Image (cartoon, helix red, strand yellow):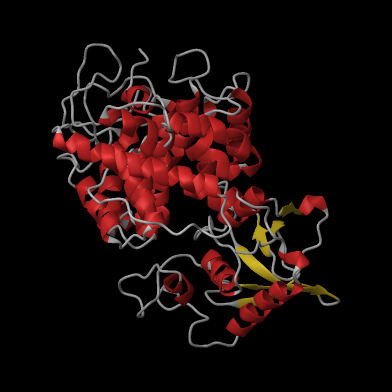
């Protein structure tokens, strides 16, 4: 039976985020963000403020405020005020206090997930809540330096031990024995795979568990991918059901799969927009196709300002949008400025990257540690002071672009993020397009290890009589120059910050 808490919790808002928040902090005056479309930031601020007031009223009435209502406002605060700001930390501490005995996150009340008379106790932790509603906030906070690694690690450990659904190829709806062996719910398994994958690539899965965790990621991801229905332009809700699921649950499947699986991500995204044009549910994926943003604003605004008075109804209709709207503003407010029309910017990239070739202080790897990851804010224990431990070709390219004054929002430590960045900003040029790369461009290499993601990324510093010249981090464990490198799949031109 198709009964789940996500419909009741997020009926009016993006279940994709169904994270709806709470905090004890009062609203504070804000500076408008230069270069952003103010309608998005104003609406974000409004949803935040009204949600904070709703939390206060809920607390006064002794109403339980769920983790999925707390998490998104912590995410909003982290973006707006900083992850170390006391307002953000207050929300995060409140969120941590809602952990279940198993160190997952749940509803805080009994719940019959499948509507079959088997009711889970109030202490049950749910896969979608830990992996997606709360998990995205934890990962964003970890990246921002405000969430301790242990808070992410404990959810990853819990999730890696979750029971399996029917068939043994995807995650169960919850940790409860009532939900073990029941039909696979596609957004649940997609979110679970997404969180584990992100925890692993941040080094937050124990080395001894890595193979087991990645096997789960592949199994859950592949099962979801195999059940995409092209004729429906999306997924059914669960295994054995018929008909396209609603916009909120479908986008909650599309968003993690877009990151997890390039072979289906673009198709699924296009299907979401085609099946649910102009839906407020699309708020969570607008940064992936900014052309759809303005046409969706009115629907989002209507949903986020639904006239309701009860505190929990306010949270349902508003708070989940709070962290999404600033992201849309930052990504979609104005056309991207191309570097290939600004030679001075290209020269800066080439000069900065070239200088690193001879900077013996930090142009190489030491015991798996590198300078560039640490300089971007990700330091690791056991490394030289201020250095981080991660595969670092993408961090080198990000560091150079950042120093050159270029946009790096949306880029991460994976080479694949450069391809997605270009696709999102309209600056991706596959080799087949015949595009001639220019200095400043990122060169993105093919997927040769079979995981569906780009293997490596570097920076173009020249393209002339001597051929294509690149400078790349983590090539032979150091910064290196290459001439006419093979196996590129395309190029991403940077955009101005």
Q: Is residue 392 above or below residue 43?
A: below
Q: Most extreme residue toward the right, as rendered?
A: 465
Q: Quadrant of residue 36?
A: bottom right
Outermost residue on the front side: it is: 29
Question: Where is the C terminus found, in terms of image quarters?
Answer: bottom right
Where residue 384 appears, x then y in whole percent? 36, 80
On the question of residue 257 being in view, the answer is no
For residue 339, say whether it is visible.
yes
* Residue lying at 59% horizontally and 61% vertically, measured from the top left: 456
Q: Is 238 positioned to the left or the right of 266 in the image?
A: left
Give coordinates of residue 428: x percent, y percent.
70, 53
| Quarter of the figure that contains the N terminus | top left
Residue in the foreground of this view, choosing between 386 and 478:
386
Q: Is residue 261 above or below residue 404?
A: above
Residue 218 in the image: above or below residue 350? above
Q: What residue is shown at x 33% (from left), y 38% (from top)?
A: 20
Q: Position of residue 109 (x, y in %)?
A: 18, 27
> Where is 383 relative to 183, above or below?
below
Asked whether 20 or 481 is in front, the reply is 20
Question: Residue 104: horizontal and vertical position, in percent?
Answer: 24, 40
Position of 405 compared to 197: left or right? right
Image label count: 0
């Amino acid at each position: 039976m198709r009964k789940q808490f996500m419909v009741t919790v997020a009926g009016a808002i993006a279940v994709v985020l169904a994270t709806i928040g709470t905090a004890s902090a009062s609203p504070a005056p804000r500076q408008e963000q230069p270069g952003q479309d103010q309608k998005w930031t104003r609406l974000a601020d409004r949803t935040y403020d009204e949600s904070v007031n709703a939390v206060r009223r809920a607390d006064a009435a002794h109403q339980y405020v769920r983790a999925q209502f707390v998490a998104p406002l912590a995410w909003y605060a982290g973006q707006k005020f900083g992850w170390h700001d006391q307002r953000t930390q207050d929300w995060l501490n409140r969120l941590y206090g809602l952990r279940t005995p198993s160190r997952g996150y749940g509803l805080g009340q009994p719940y019959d997930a499948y509507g079959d008379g088997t009711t889970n106790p109030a202490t049950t932790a749910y896969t979608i809540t830990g992996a997606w509603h709360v998990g995205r906030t934890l990962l964003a906070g970890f990246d921002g330096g405000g969430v301790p690694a242990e808070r992410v690690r404990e959810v990853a450990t819990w999730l890696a031990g979750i029971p399996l659904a029917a068939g043994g190829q995807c995650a169960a709806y919850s940790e409860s024995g009532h939900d073990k062996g029941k039909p696979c719910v596609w957004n649940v398994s997609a979110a679970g795979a997404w969180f584990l994958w992100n925890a692993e690539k941040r080094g937050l899965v124990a080395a001894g568990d890595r193979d087991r965790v990645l096997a789960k990621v592949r199994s859950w991801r592949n099962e979801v991918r195999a059940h995409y229905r092209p004729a429906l332009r999306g997924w059914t809700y669960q295994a054995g059901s018929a008909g396209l699921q609603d916009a909120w649950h479908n986008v909650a499947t599309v968003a993690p799969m877009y990151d997890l699986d390039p072979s289906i991500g673009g198709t699924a995204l296009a299907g979401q927009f085609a099946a649910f044009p102009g839906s407020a549910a699309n708020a969570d994926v607008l940064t992936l196709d900014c052309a759809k943003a303005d046409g969706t604003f009115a629907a989002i605004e209507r949903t986020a300002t639904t006239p309701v008075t009860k505190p929990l109804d306010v949270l349902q209709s508003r708070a989940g949008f709070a962290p999404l709207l600033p992201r849309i503003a930052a990504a979609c407010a104005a056309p991207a400025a191309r570097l290939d029309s600004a030679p001075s910017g290209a020269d800066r990239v080439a000069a900065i990257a070239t200088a690193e070739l001879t900077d013996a202080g930090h142009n190489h790897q030491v015991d798996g540690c590198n300078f560039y990851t640490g300089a971007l804010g990700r330091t690791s224990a056991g490394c030289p002071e201020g250095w981080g431990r991660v595969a670092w070709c993408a961090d080198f390219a990000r560091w150079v672009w950042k120093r050159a004054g270029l946009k790096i929002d949306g880029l991460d430590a994976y080479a694949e993020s450069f391809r997605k960045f270009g696709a999102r900003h309209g600056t991706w040029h596959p080799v087949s397009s015949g595009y001639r790369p220019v200095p400043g461009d990122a060169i993105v290499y093919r997927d040769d290890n079979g995981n569906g993601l780009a293997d490596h990324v570097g920076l173009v510093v020249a393209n002339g009589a001597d051929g294509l010249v690149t400078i790349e981090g983590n090539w032979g464990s150091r910064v290196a120059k290459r001439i006419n490198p093979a196996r590129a799949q395309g190029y991403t031109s940077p955009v101005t910050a």
